[in-house]
């Protein structure tokens, strides 16, 4: 199943990450809590989220991965698969 979704995962991961990167920051700012940690690795600055407990960090990652797979399945089912069928009908 993931093999079938691999192109959709590739195409939608960035789109799903945009709200996942913004919503926690907005919520934390409203609550007056700092959740971002900046560090420099290999000369490049990186911003990581730290929700305080490693299980919360893991839960955030799991929810993100599930959202990527869900959105990818939707785009595969309703965009990629019908497009392939249409294109194959025109070519073949």
Image (cartoon, helix red, strand yellow):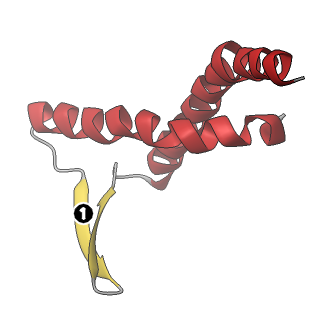
Q: Position of residue 21 (x, y in %)?
A: 32, 42
Which residue, as the protein is rendered here, is positioned at the far front? 91
Q: Quadrant of residue 19?
A: top left
Residue at 62% across, 39% down: 9
Q: Position of residue 44 (x, y in %)?
A: 28, 78
Which residue, as the protein is rendered here, is positioned at the far right? 92
Q: Position of residue 17 (x, y in %)?
A: 41, 40
Quadrant placement of the N terminus? top right
Q: Relative to residue 71, is residue 58 depicted above or below?
A: below
Q: In this rendering, would 64 be left or right of 5?
A: left
The residue that label 1 is drawn on is: 37
Report the front residue among 73 and 87: 87
Q: Residues within 10 Å of mark 1 (few under 14, many from 20)?
A: few
Q: In this rendering, would 25 be left or right of 81?
A: left
Q: In this rendering, would 61 be left or right of 8?
A: left
Q: In this rendering, would 3 be left or right of 25?
A: right
Element type at marker 1?
strand
Q: Relative to residue 88, is residue 19 depicted above or below?
A: below
Quadrant placement of the C terminus? top right
Report the front residue among 36 and 46: 46
Count of picture labels: 1
Q: Position of residue 25 (x, y in %)?
A: 21, 40
Residue at 45% across, 44% down: 56
Which residue, as the protein is rendered here, is positioned at the far bottom? 42
Q: Quadrant of residue 37?
A: bottom left
Q: Quadrant of residue 36?
A: bottom left
Report the front residue among 16 and 92: 92
Residue at 79% across, 39% down: 2
Residue at 37% across, 36% down: 20
């Amino acid at each position: 199943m993931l093999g079938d979704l691999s192109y959709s995962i590739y195409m939608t991961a960035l789109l799903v990450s945009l709200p996942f990167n913004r919503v926690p920051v907005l919520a934390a700012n409203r609550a007056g809590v700092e959740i971002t940690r900046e560090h420099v690795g290999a000369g490049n600055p990186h911003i990581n989220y730290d929700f305080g407990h490693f299980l919360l960090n893991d839960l955030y990652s799991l929810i993100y991965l599930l959202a990527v797979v869900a959105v990818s399945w939707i785009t595969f089912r309703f965009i990629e698969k019908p497009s392939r069928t249409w294109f194959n009908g025109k070519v073949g």
